[in-house]
Amino acid sequence: MVSVNNLKRIAIALLNYQSAHGHFPPAVLYGPDGKTPYSWRVEILPHLGQQALFDMYHFDEPWDSPANRKVLETMVPVFCRSKEMTGSSTNTCYFALTGPGTMFDGKNGTRIAEIVDSTTNTILLVEAKRDVPWTKPEDIPYAADKPLPKLGGFADVMFNVVFADGHVVALLENTPEKLLRALITKDGGEPVDAKNPVVNPGPQSNQVWGPNQSKLAPMQRR
């Protein structure tokens, strides 16, 4: 449940950011010099109750400068999948997918009106096991004409994603590629049928996708 709650909290922070700015943050932002990149994870710190840590960040210096490494070393728990993993690790467990058509394409940030496929059917963030420090302005590139990136890695058969409306789904690793690609894009126009039942609903997510499903459906607790 820790990862599910983390994703929900991050999504709420992103939605609050969207409400305040009129758009979601881009994956990479730039400091006052217009050329020093920093991550969306740093940008939303005030919306996660981490204003003091945000104020410590030097936006005119690289993410791994001596000053900014002090921020990095203060691991924000919401970016780590479980308490057991925190330890001395400063790696994030949650990533944006970047590239044309994703929620984090472009330099200006996505507006709600641009999510043609609806916030309910568009992936906002994914869970992935990668060696990426949480303040580093690096996420997961996606392209329609390239193989799907490797996601998950924490559990044997599934990984969590959060959609742009804030609900969390556990995707099975053998989710059909066509379906996953449809959920990654915000304006592909693919229809979503909410009538199909889910299979094997689990306790760690709101919903679970099965390999025999073609569309998304709300989880029905038994």
Image (cartoon, helix red, strand yellow):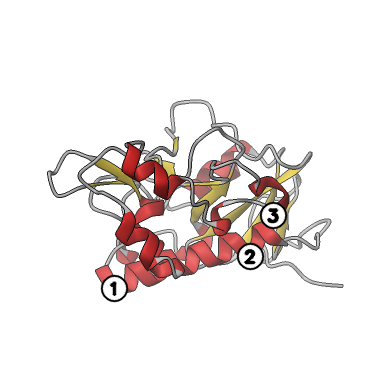
Whole-percent x, y for residue 51 in the image: 37, 67
Q: Residue furthest top?
A: 146
According to the picture, the residue beneath numbered tag 3 turns out to be 83
Q: Which residue is mark 1?
A: 20
Q: Which mark is residue 5?
A: 2
* Sequence-wise first label, 1 or 3: 1
Q: Residue at x 28, y 37 (%)?
A: 62
Residue at x 34% of width, y 59% of height: 54
Q: Nearer the viewer, mark 1 or mark 3?
A: 3
Q: Residues within 10 Å of mark 3 (few under 14, many from 20)?
A: few
Q: CA distance from mark 1 to mark 2?
A: 23 Å
Residue 207 in the image: state x and y as whole percent. 70, 62
Which sits earlier in the primary sequence, circle 1 or circle 2? 2
Q: Position of residue 167 (x, y in %)?
A: 58, 66
Element type at mark 3? helix
Q: Nearer the viewer, mark 3 or mark 2?
A: 3
The residue type indicated by label 2 comes to: Asn
Name the residue type under label 1: Ala
